[in-house]
Amino acid sequence: MMENANVEPGSGAVPLPEEPELHDTFLLKLYVAGQTPKSMAAIENLNKICKEHLLGFYKLEVIDLARNPALARTDKILAIPTLVRNLPTPISRIIGDLSDEEQVLIGLNIKKI
Amino acid sequence: MPTTLDTRDLIRENESLKLRLAEAEATLDAISHGSVDALVVTAGKDREEVRVILDMGYLGDSLFNQVAQPIFILDHAYRIVRSNGPAQLMCGRNPTSLPFSEAVTLLPTLESDFPVPDELAADWIGEGKHLSALEVCHQHPLRGMRYYLLDANPVALSWEGVQGGMVTLVDITERKLAEIQSSVMSGQLRQQFTFMKSISDNIAEGLILVDEDQKVIFQNPAASQMMQIPESEAAGEDVTEVFRIESEAGGRLSLDWTDPGVVEGAARRAWVRGRNGSRTPVQYSIYPIKDGEKLRGNILVVGNISERLTSERQLHLSMEKQQQSQKMEAIGRLAGGIAHDFNNLLLVILGFTDMILQQPGLDPAVEDSLREVRKAGEKAASLTGQLLAYSRKQVLAPKLRPINEAVLDIRKMIGRFVGDNIHVDLDLTPEILEVEIDLAKLQQVLVNMILNAKDAMPDGGTLSIRTGRMETSGRDRSGMAGEIAHESGDGVPPGSYAYIEIQDTGSGMSEAVMERLFEPFFTTKEFGKGSGLGLSTAYGIVLQLGGHLQVFSEVGKGSRFRVILPLAKNQSFPSVPAKSANLPSQMGAGKVVLLVEDEDMVRRLLARLLKENGFTVLEARNGEDALAKLPAPETPIDLVVTDLLMAGMGGIELAKRLAEVRPGLEILFISGYREDQYNMPLIAGQPPYFVAKPFGPSEFLAKIRSILEKKWGN
């Protein structure tokens, strides 16, 4: 069940063609490597951001490359931690421990620059 | 020319490459900012293998440096690849790329059993060997000697499994120093404890240490011995259950700890009841053990006073004995003094009675009465004699007699004394051994001993009486085997003696009885059968005769009493025969006698007696009076008769003065004390003439006659 709590219907606002609709579900993948400090920090920071800005609109998958390094191929991961937004398209990625919330929101296209 | 499709493809590809490049840039940017801690790489021939490489940096300087212990990360060649702050402090520099053994010189500790350098020198990384808790020390140039526990473990330095090692050190210097200090301290304490224990083990006093609840903490062996409780059993017990005290009579005493007198060390006496029922007299004191103001417990000091009590009792007994003997001495003096005065009175009574009785033509009725007076006087004299014997100041009348005479005189009586069941065996020396004795008194002694011998042989036996000569060279007691001996005085001095021995085959005496044998009033006889004065009187008489008394006895075999008397040194000189009272009345004609006597009655009696016999008598009351009344030198004085003890100048002082003013005067001393004779100084090199009171007129006149006869040779 989807909710669109953040958009007022009939507001007359025309979204930009490449911007994802806010009511679209966000499919996020976080690549970590075991319990390295930055992996742990990334998981914590992302959970916080999602709960604040995407509650009900996101699906998060945490992938531990320490257990299965081959999964890095799927999204061509080079460094850990890396967050990948598979949906809405286009695919975007943010590398690091996600400690800068502002940058994360922009990177995920939740907030405009 | 590229087709539109081609162009679109190219644009699309270009966009994709741009995106990839942007992603790569972002990745590199993230890496360079340290935002990642692992990289994903492909490896293998066809790059088919994907690996995740953890960035060593993820351990993080912060994490690494927050650890207080020195940590060294070594590569497989034992070179230091990383070290934290404490590790660098330990080296005094950044030791990166230096060989570990060069950067840090570790030494084994004295206490460590590990050959530290050897173990560390081995290839522990290559062998995958873990070194754990090695005690090492390290000399730091500034901080001095530090002690560490060292752990060395092989570790994988990367996901690729590159082997290295991690050395961590835990600084245990403080702990180690404390240990060393405490081991030194405990050594000192142990030494002190050993010292204290050796003291408490060796002192005779019992020590019991109790806590504030009066529970025994410690007791020494002496205390264990007294209470008959091993320390292991006493520990933890209530002290009143361990230190059980009783009164002398056996009543349980309580140990009152609250009594300040007791707690502050006042000595108390009690009897300790041991677990085995033993009783030990003790003196104990309790001392508080305080920590500041707080009472921590008490120490009980208990001394065994058995020996002290015994010696106190002995002292008490000997003091009693001494008091008794002083009392006896005092009574003796009193009796002697009274007897002396009575003797003077009796001398007068008997003297005048005799004089009147000698008068011719006396009314027979008066004569009868006078004879009664005389009898009563003699009885009184006998009483004073007994008083004097008791005080050992009895007047003896020693005369030279063969010692056998003392036995022969009473031989007939002996049979009557001892009865038919006792065989009397006389063994008298054929020698004539003359001794100076008062025969009657010596016989009294012998009779006394014979009666004792008889009492010792109620079922019969043999009574042996022996006389003989005895030469002593010293303090020999010549007792026989098995006999215990008891002797009068300080033993028999060397010399020639005659002895009389009275031996029975009776029950004998124990040592205890022997010791008290000569004590007045000591008797083993039933109440009323003996006064306890017999042997003490005998003892006194023998001593007075200058002799000694030896007693030998063995329980069950009988006793042997030996009276030892000094042999007379010279041949007997003819004793003055007690001639009849009717002396030639004019024996004193023309002779002058200076009579010095302070007792008026006695002087008058003697003066009259002398005058009746023709003497001219000069009377004086004492020495001074005599010297004053001394006639001119041309008036001859044939004899001085003087009392010894007088108010004013006595007889001896008078004799000395007379020797100066009238040398060559004959002096006859008269005295109530027989032993005065032996204490008198020689007058002109001669023993003085002496006559003991009381004496009868005839004895007195006989003595004067003998002096004058000797002087004039007629």
Image: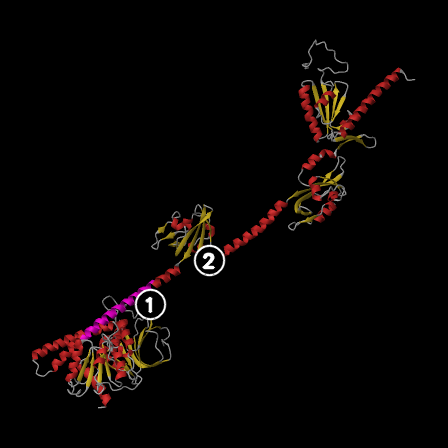
Residue plotted at (39% across, 47% down): B258
Residue at 92 percent across and 17 percent down: it is B1
The answer to the question of whether label 1 and label 2 lie on touching residues, with beta carbons closer than 8 A, is: no
Indicate the amino acid at tag 2. Ile
Against B615, residue B104 (above or below) is: above
In reply to whether residue B333 is colored magenta, the answer given is yes
Q: Nearer the viewer, residue B70 or B251?
A: B70
In the image, residue B116 lies in the stretch drawn in magenta: no
Assign the magenta stretch its main secondary structure: helix
Q: How is the image coloured?
A: secondary structure
List the residue tagged with mark 1: B512
Residue B203: assigned label: 2
Task: Compare marks 1 and 2 and give the one earlier in the sequence.
Answer: 2
**What x and y, as percent, mark residue B143?**
66, 46
Q: In this image, B363 relative to B157: left or right?
A: left
Is residue B234 toward the left or the right of residue B484 in the image? right
- Range drawn in magenta: B316-344
